[in-house]
Amino acid sequence: MLKTAGQNALEKGMTFSSLSLDKLVTDIVVNHPQMVRIKANLAPVRFHGDRFYLQELLLILLDNALEACSVDNLVSLQLESADDHIVLTVKNQGMIDQNQLDAAFRRYVTSRPGHFGIGLAMARDIAQAHHGALCGKVSDGWVTMTLSFPLCRLEKEIL
C-alpha cells in the first residue's frame, strides 16, 4: 500500500482490461491470512478496470474492516450487479461514529497509532479513477463500506 501511496494512480497510468471481479475478490479472500473471518457472497461480475489498483482498493477495504472489529466477528463481502451498477459492500461491526468515518476518507487523518491515514483516501481515488464511488455508513454498531461502479455497455453485453 505504501508503494502506491506516494504515487497518484492517474499519474502512473492504469491498464484497463476485462476481468472477473468476483474472481479477483475470491483470490484476495482465499489468500488472505484471516480468510476464516471473511464471509463472501459474490455474484459473477465482469468489469473493465485495472487489476492491480482494484486489488489494492479491495485489500484496503478488507484489511480496514478486519482490523476495526473484534477477532470473534466476521466481515461480510457482497458483490452484485444491479440494472446499471456493480455494487460491492464490506460490512463489519465497529465502534466508530459517522463523523470519524467521514474524516478517515481524508489523507493523513487517522485515529489509530502506527497508521498513516492514507488507505481510505487512496481507495476512494482508485474508485473514482474507475468512474466509481466509495462511501461509508455507520448504523447500529455496523460499518458498511459501499463501492459502486456504473455498468458500461461492454459489461452489460457480457453479463
Image: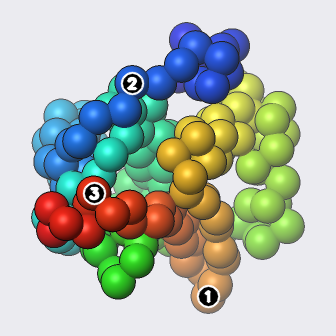
Amino acid type assigned to the residue bearing label 3 in the image: Leu
Give the residue at mark 2.
Answer: 15
Q: Is residue 11 above or below residue 99?
A: above
Measuring from the top left, give residue 114's x and y in whole percent: 70, 25
The quarter of the picture where the C terminus appears is bottom left
Give the x, y percent position of residue 116: 73, 26
Tag 1, which secondary structure? loop
Q: Which amino acid does label 2 sit on?
A: Thr
Q: In this view, does 85 lie above or below 28?
A: below
Q: Residue 144 location, x and y as percent?
A: 54, 71
Give me the C-alpha separation between circle 1 and circle 3. 38 Å
Mark before the other along the chain sequence, 1 or 3: 1
Q: Distance between the residues labelled 2 and 1?
A: 40 Å
Residue at left 74%, top 61%?
101
The answer, for residue 158, to whether it is visible in the render is: yes
Mark 1 — residue? Answer: 140
Is 156 in front, or is 64? 156
Residue at which label 3 appears: 154
Vertical position of residue 63 compared to residue 148: above or below? above
Callout 1: 10 Å neighbours few (<14), some, many (20+)? few
